[in-house]
Image (spheres, helix red, strand yellow):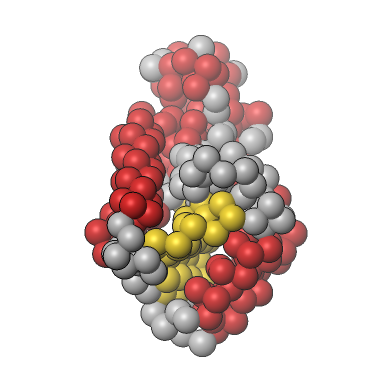
Amino acid sequence: MGDELEQTLLQMRALVDDAVSKTRRRAGGNQGALTVVTDPSNERIRRSAERLISTARRSVSLALPCRVAMSEALSGLLDMLREISAAGVGVRVLGGPGILDDRNVRRHLASLPPRPAFDVRISAHQHQEVLIVDGRMALMRAEFGVAGPQAVTIRVPMVLRALDTLFTGAWSSATPARSYRRVSARGRTEIARQVLRCLTSGNTDEAAAQSLGLSVRTYRRHVAELMQELGAVSRFQAGVHAVELGLLTPETSAA
């Protein structure tokens, strides 16, 4: 799944690059379909994002890079996203585990109702940084050979549909932030890490329990609890999810 997603991201980036190049060459074409914004301070990009969000009527989807602690985009737009969600606009934020390091994000999650209009999910897969509004317009971080931070405003239906499909697929396989925080806290205990390593090593329950100094019944109880929290339907899937969520490294799980 991870390799397929990254391959799709590469294809999507190539699609946008190609669309930008064609639009620049087409003097009489629709010049508003793609607009490149460049700003060394990120200020123009932030204002573009704010203007786009202010037009939302149905939905806003924001995907953030997974290998950064916290994106300035989310930090600056969080209050605005909360306001529009309170007005009935559905908001989805997809990011890596690092976004939970931000105090404002944690405070927001703590105040969410049981079925929020503003939802945050966590994935260890790398995502293209993109903001999609109502499926009719998007702002995507991009690089087109110009120095400084860049983004492209997209109104091309074909590209928008592909971006929306990609986001929805990544969203469906991501973990709700609240669940991730519970899983992360439990998964980082020593006994949980040991049980997860046993799951990925292929040991029998008896051998695994003996190696950990546990009864088979206690070991199986730990396994069942971890599988439930990871949303896994099999032990193999539990190990895969543990790696995806950073509870185990691929090297550790293979040991």
Examine the rendering and report whether any part of residue 127 can be seen. yes
Q: Residue furthest front?
A: 27
**Where, quadrant-wise, is the N terminus in this rendering?**
top left
Seen at 56% across and 69% down, the residue is 48
- 75 relative to 240 in the view: left or right: right
Viewer-side residue, 17 vs 70: 17
- Determine whether 33 is above or below 187 in the image: below
Examine the rendering and report whether any part of residue 166 can be seen. no
Report which quarter residue 167 is drawn in.
bottom left
The percent position of residue 157, horizontal first and vertical second, equals: 27, 64
Seen at 45% across and 62% down, the residue is 35
The tally of labels here is 0
Q: Residue furthest bottom?
A: 87
- Determine whether 196 is above or below 184 in the image: above
Seen at 46% across and 39% down, the residue is 125
Q: Residue furthest left?
A: 158
The percent position of residue 161, horizontal first and vertical second, equals: 27, 60
Viewer-side residue, 70 vs 56: 56
The percent position of residue 150, horizontal first and vertical second, equals: 56, 52
Seen at 33% across and 52% down, the residue is 25
Viewer-side residue, 70 vs 234: 70
Report which quarter residue 77 is drawn in.
bottom right
